[in-house]
Amino acid sequence: MPDSPHIPSEAQPPADQNDARATAEQSTAAQPTVPQPTVAEPAMAGTTSSSPATTSGSPTPDSPAKKRAVGPLVGALVVGAVLGGASGAGVAAWAVSANNSSHNSVTSGPQTVTINNKDDVNTTTAVAAKAGPSVVTINVTASAEGGTGSGVVLSSDGYILTNTHVVTLDGDTATGTIEVTTYDGKLYTAKVVGIDPVVDLAVIKLQNAGGLKPIEFGDSTKINVGDKVVAIGAPLALPNTVTDGIVSAVNRSIQIASSAVPNSGGSGDNSTPGDGSSPYNFWNFGDGSGNGGNGSGSGSSSGQTADISLPVIQTDAAINPGNSGGALLDRDGKLIGINVAIASTGSTSASGQSGSIGVGFAIPAGLAQRIGDEIIKTGKGSHGLLGASVMTATSDKSSVVGALIADVTSGGGADKAGLKKGDVVTSFNGLPITDSTDLTAQVRTLAPGSTAKLSYVRGNDSNTVSVTLGTLKL
């Protein structure tokens, strides 16, 4: 039996379903768009799932880009991306829906970190002064829509790392126009190098840029709960905004809606076998054993209907719409995460959008750096595949929390490691696994061919095996 739908290995079905279907892969959570700064009319670049695509120009004066805010509309706690124009998505089994609304303009211009008293600065000031020049504001426009997000500088000649949902306006376009404002107020047009909707990361390249200051990467595996962190980005289109807080949790996993978009070239290269109803079908991935796409899920009518599982760092540093793609930094000013989503209490009105409630999430820097490098080299990122459909273990089927193996793909990594239907995975590479989202997120973090230690419970026995991951095929 093939891996679970969308993300064939390691996916989780809704808790109320008895069938063992895996959760679909998710892409970065989308965040509400915010009004563009008056300094420059944003342009947006769209992108295909693995190849760059940019076209359309800025809207005419008669029909300015409409800033949209997409946010969760449920009473429960939800997670929404922190782009100034994206969708919301639920964490674990929480439900979520998204809504568009327009905003009034916010007048803002480039503004560097101002230090009025050099004899009385604190850690946050020092971090902002060091890393601020490595964070940019990204404005994207397409047709009558637009959004604002953030990004971090990877190279002096203009490679920028951000979120997929930033450059695709939450999966709504593959043919937008992108304009980037640097820390010192310079404006550049940019093109998409490639996107990775599996972990909501993307790389863009500034045109005719030079002399930029690359971000310094830290070790995201060595952070502790309680460590001081600083976030820099453009919340509500206010560039170079600095907030601080602590690491609230590590090794957290969330589920968010995919921001995949159709291949703008119309070649269908990004599609996989399915019912043909979706221009970018997230459901049928290969099983990692060379058998190609043979997933059992059905196609979807929109690239945003699928979900992806992300490993994240949780922080209470204030993150709001527009912070997506921006930097989460340690006390030394080194990058430990790419801000991607926030949790909110939801909104009951069609136009309402909740802001930060102190529960924000960032993609660990280690994963972001690997995917960023791969996109620059090949135009896309790569991810491991366990080769098994999984669901969250429940008390009627297990005595411990974990990810329940619902089925194993013949010839896949799980099969070769001896895993069987009914096993409950409790640990992956030393990290606790509490549900199927945890397992999916950790497997996707690793590159194909990676070997991991996996612990599981079978009946009353606990076992640990070495698993070699296959390749997730889009």
Image (cartoon, rainbow, N blue to C red):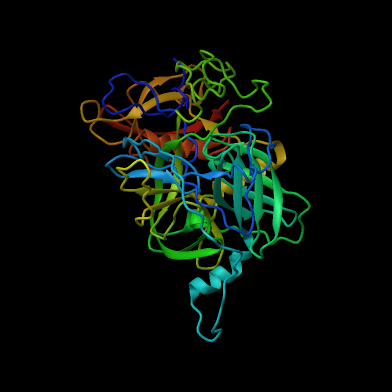
Q: Residue drawn at (52%, 15%), measured in percent from left and top?
A: 274
Q: Residue drawn at (59%, 42%), measured in percent from left and top?
A: 63
- Residue sitting nearer the eye, 176 or 134: 176
Residue 381 falls left or right of residue 245: right
Q: Is residue 67 above or below residue 216?
A: above
Residue 384 falls left or right of residue 206: left
Could you say where residue 82 lies in the image, as x and y percent from the top left?
47, 49
Could you say where residue 363 lies in the image, as x and y percent from the top left?
50, 48
On the image, which quarter does residue 271 sit in? top right
Could you say where residue 462 lies in the image, as x and y percent from the top left?
32, 34
Residue 320 falls left or right of residue 400: right
- Residue sitting nearer the eye, 316 or 396: 316
> Looking at the image, which residue sits at the far bottom?
119
Q: Residue drawn at (30%, 45%), measured in percent from left and top?
A: 77
> Looking at the image, which residue sits at the far top?
275
- Residue sitting nearer the eye, 105 or 120: 105
